[in-house]
Amino acid sequence: MEVDENLSLRDAHNRSTELEQAIQRLGNRDYKLDVNIHIEPLGRHIATPDIGAGEMRQLEMAVESFVNHLQRNYDELINCHEVRVRQVEHHILVSCHCVMKADLSITRIHDVLAAIEDLVKERFPQISRVTIHPEPPEPS
């Protein structure tokens, strides 16, 4: 979702949550849809091996630990959780949620998350894409 680049994380997160909930309402009531909106500032442009479930879970835990250790370098980052690893057409995709300081601009948050995404791909070269969903620390 693209939002005004000066919008606060809190406001951008509220908008993305509303959209996620609207998409979930479109789904079948027998199962919960997993919706993860990636927030981008408006105007910015945004491994082949088959791995088993055990290896995917190990990679999820390794990525979560790695990102949470980045708090030393990025004080905007509070924590990383809900790491998911998926394989699509021989490409490994990672998505996760990061709690970030709520009053920072979405542009600052995006820049920090872009750096974290690059560090994850550098540390884990088998990962093709990293998508991080930022959220504020307190309920919105």
Image (cartoon, grey):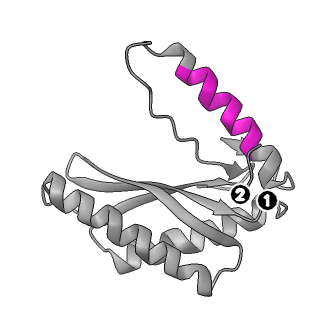
* Gap between marks 2 and 1 measured at Cα: 7 Å
42, above or below 127, in the image = above
Q: Name the element at disc 1.
A: loop
Please provide percent x and percent y for residue 71: 60, 80
Magenta segment, which residues? 13-24
Kind of residue at badge 2: Pro
The residue mark sitting in front, 2 or 1, is 2
Q: How many marks?
A: 2
**Residue tagged by mark 2?**
137
Q: Looking at the magenta stretch, what is its main secondary structure?
A: helix
Which of the marked residues, 2 or 1, is nearer the chain's N terminus? 1
Image quadrant for the N terminus? top right
- On the question of residue 3 being in view, the answer is no
Residue drawn at x 69%, y 56% as measured from the top left: 44
Q: Is residue 67 left or right of residue 52?
A: right
Residue 79 found in image quarter: bottom right
- Residue 58: in magenta span: no
| Nearer-the-camera pick, 21 or 6 | 21
Q: Is residue 71 left or right of residue 15?
A: left
Please provide percent x and percent y for residue 54: 16, 58
Please provide percent x and percent y for residue 69: 50, 81
| Nearer-the-camera pick, 94 or 70 | 70
Image quadrant for the C terminus? top right
- On the question of residue 65 being in view, the answer is yes
Residue 32 found in image quarter: top left
**Residue tagged by mark 1?**
102
Residue drawn at x 69%, y 64% as measured from the top left: 100
Residue drawn at x 56%, y 23% as measured from the top left: 23
